[in-house]
Amino acid sequence: MDNFRSMALPNTSLLLLVLQMCALAWQAWALVDLRMEDTIEVSMDNSTEIPCLYTFTEEPKMVMVQWFVREREGHRVRISYSDLTMQKVDEDTSYSNRISVRSNSDGETLTIHGVKLSDEREFFCQVSGLSAGNGEGRTFLKVFDPPEPPVIEGVLSGVSVSGDSPLKIASCETREGFPKPNITWYRDHIPIHPTSGLANVVTLVTKESSGLYTVQSELHYKVTKEVKDAHFSCEVSYFVPGAVRTLKSKDINITVHYPTTSVEIWKESPEGSVKEGDTVEIRCQGDGNPPAPIIFNREQSDVELDSSQGLLVLKEVSRADSGVYECHSLDVDEVVDTLQLTVHYLDTAVVVPKDSEVMLKGESLTATCNALSSLETSTVWFKNGTVVGRGHIMHLQDATFDTAGQYDCEVTVPSLPGLLTSGSVHIIVQGAPQIKDADREIKLTEKVGGWVNLSCEVRGYPRPAITWSITGSQSQSWREVDKRETEDQVHSVVMLKVTTHTVAVCNSTNDFGIETKMYSIRSIPFSQTPTARKTSADNSGVIIVVIIVSILLLAVLGSVFYFLYKKGKLPCGRSGKQEIINAYSTKEKTNKDDIVVEMKAKKTEESMLLKSANGEKKPPNDQNSTLSS
């Protein structure tokens, strides 16, 4: 078998040589037109086709087509062969399993599957029609692989403005691209061009074992303080079949280190004005980076105040905390700023007269309420929760018992809510008792055996004492059922059972006088209709007048009787008594007998009152009683 192969190879070579010689013999009058594209572009891992189109000026008897590739070393290697009888892909090449050839009347097309980066090379198509002519064409296959998106990173430690030359501020990297991608730097979306003493770009290109490129770019920049607000980015441009595309990184800020040139101090809380008792926070901040240490002190004082990270906290401030506060930045050069702090205050209200004041009825009084404050104040006077005056001065004119009581003053600062103080004064009005409705006599009508409630409400200072005087009804038929007392007021209620016509008097007394109130109760027997109980006040007055006149008349008659007795003109023996009795029986019209008859006939309630006045014993129903309250 090996001998056969060794014989076949020389024979094949000889055949090809003969064919070539024949072809050269016919080249003088036979031509072939072969057409191939100069360059074909394809993305890695895709498939691509390389066409080889040909035409002959004379119909060939046989056509042979061979495909070759140029190796890296420069020599060519056949990868496919075809003629009228066969078509095959050469074995033991890098394309044995990745290519296919398709023939038609116009020529052949070589298809490469799974294009690799190593496929970027020249592909040759050689056509031989023997006597009909020979031709060869070439196509360069260009392979593309897009890189990964760029990764940008600023210098973590920051960059100082103190440098005299551009310093590295950021780096940008893109990996595994083909052909080699390019990196462009931007500041605030404006391209950065290398400028001597201002900007410089250092690029490092690495070709990986896979043949792909990794590009690293460093931006060196002359940093100023304004750079801290700038946004830097990088952009990668790369080739794809038929176009150029770009990938942009994110924007980054550069950490710039610069010294403090100024500081600012301000009151962070509370908002608005400060009052005693508030917690005050004062903040101080410099414009350097990194921030320089901050310390606080009061003006004209070297004592450092306790603070933390530029914050000074003053708890429960008082007016003594008012003043100028300084903050210092401990940087290369010391920088100072100041703040004026004013703590507003409102002292305790001072009321004059103090605590309590005694007045006489009819007197006037001026009371004042003042509180020292750093701001304008407003004062309101209250009594029992009701506003009775505004302003620091309150005038009380022509005092009455209604004037008495506690007066509260409230002092506020309208411009600073929360500042409030108050005081009070207790007013006492002295005077004689004053009974409610004492100026009129109250007349009542009640049937015998009925109960009535009688009330007596009196004001005065010192607090009056109340006593009740009951005339007419039995002493055990009434009692006090309610009694309420305040500093200058007494209210007494008695319950009275009516047994006869009754007069009840409420007597109130204190150190300044006495005042009374009278109730007249007319009793109505059970036999009278309810209408009789409703006698008018005028008829009751007439009855009282008649009673008084009758009493006076009886007193006069008693005096006459006594005078006659002393003169001996009035019989005192049994016959005299009998004469009187007879006279009463016969009702003779003599003056003397008329007097006697009147005395016997007028044995009424008025005569009993007269006897009581002369010391005689009264019937149980007609006794007087007095209750002291």
Image: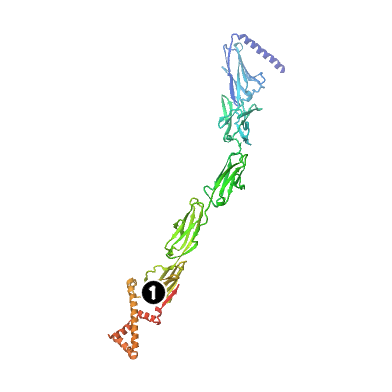
Reply above or below: 234 against 377.
above
Q: Which amino acid, mark 1?
A: Val
Residue 261 lies, in percent from the top left, at: 59, 39
Reply above or below: 489 against 200.
below
Residue 340 lies, in percent from the top left, at: 55, 46
**In front: 511, or 221?**
511
Residue 385 visible, this orientation: no
**SS category of the residue bearing label 1:** strand
- Which residue has dot 1 on it? 503
**In front: 114, or 580?**
580
Residue 502 visible, this orientation: yes
Residue 387, located in which quarter of the rendered image? bottom left
Quadrant (top left/top right/bottom left/bottom right) for the N terminus: top right
**In front: 350, or 52?**
350
| Number of marks | 1
Is residue 453 found left or right of 128 in the rendered image? left
Reply above or below: 182 against 8.
below
Reply above or below: 332 against 385.
above
Residue 33 lies, in percent from the top left, at: 57, 14
Colour setting: rainbow
